[in-house]
Image (cartoon, grey):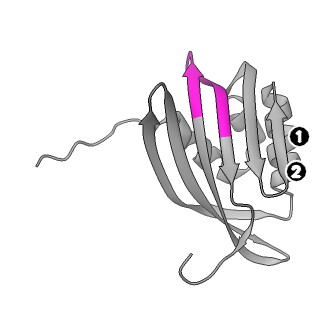
Amino acid sequence: MMSVERLTETAGEEFASILATKNPDRLRAMFADSLDFRALTPNNFWEAETPHQLVDEIIYGQWFEPTDHIQGVTTVTTSRVADCEHVAYRLRINNPGGNFIVEQQAYYTTNDGKIDWMRILCTGFRPATSVS
């Protein structure tokens, strides 16, 4: 069987990578000006209609605080579900409370190279173990 090398990463893989760098400008640039975003975390339901709301108010304003040091993306998987893309990623995080793993499942669509619709389900901060 012949192996096929993928030359470009998906928008979902890029999203996970930029999310982990905590670079709000680059993350905002991934999204269309008019956005349909919803997410579910262990304690909240989130909605955003603009990249600013999503990135500045939710992702880096509520989900990941300045003391949350994202050490990296440990796994990323992608697939397609009918007319949308899927990406699952796991982040390793350290903060004053210890070491944690966060996994998110995201479904999204793009228009002109920008994410315009996204749904995320998040595990929340789970204590890291040697097998995480």
Magenta part of the chain: 108-119
Question: Which amino acid, by three-letter code, is at mark 2?
Answer: Gln
Query: Measured along the vertical axis of the image, is residue 62 above or below residue 8?
Result: below
Q: Position of residue 5 (x, y in %)?
A: 27, 43
Q: Secondary structure at mark 2?
A: helix
Residue in the picture at 80% in, 64% down = 68
Q: Read off the residue under disc 2.
A: 62
Q: Residues within 10 Å of mark 2 (few under 14, many from 20)?
A: few
Query: Measured along the vertical axis of the image, is residue 27 above or below residue 113?
Result: below
Residue in the picture at 84% in, 77% down = 97
Q: Position of residue 102 (x, y in %)?
A: 67, 62
Q: Is residue 44 visible?
A: yes
Q: Is residue 8 magenta?
A: no
Q: Read off the residue under disc 1.
A: 57
| Res 80 quadrant in image | top left
Residue in the picture at 66% in, 53% down = 20
| Res 29 quadrant in image | top right
Compare residues 122 and 91 and report the one nearer the observer.
122
In this rendering, position of residue 81 left or right of residue 25: left
Q: Secondary structure at mark 1?
A: helix
Question: Which amino acid, by three-letter code, is at mark 1?
Answer: Glu
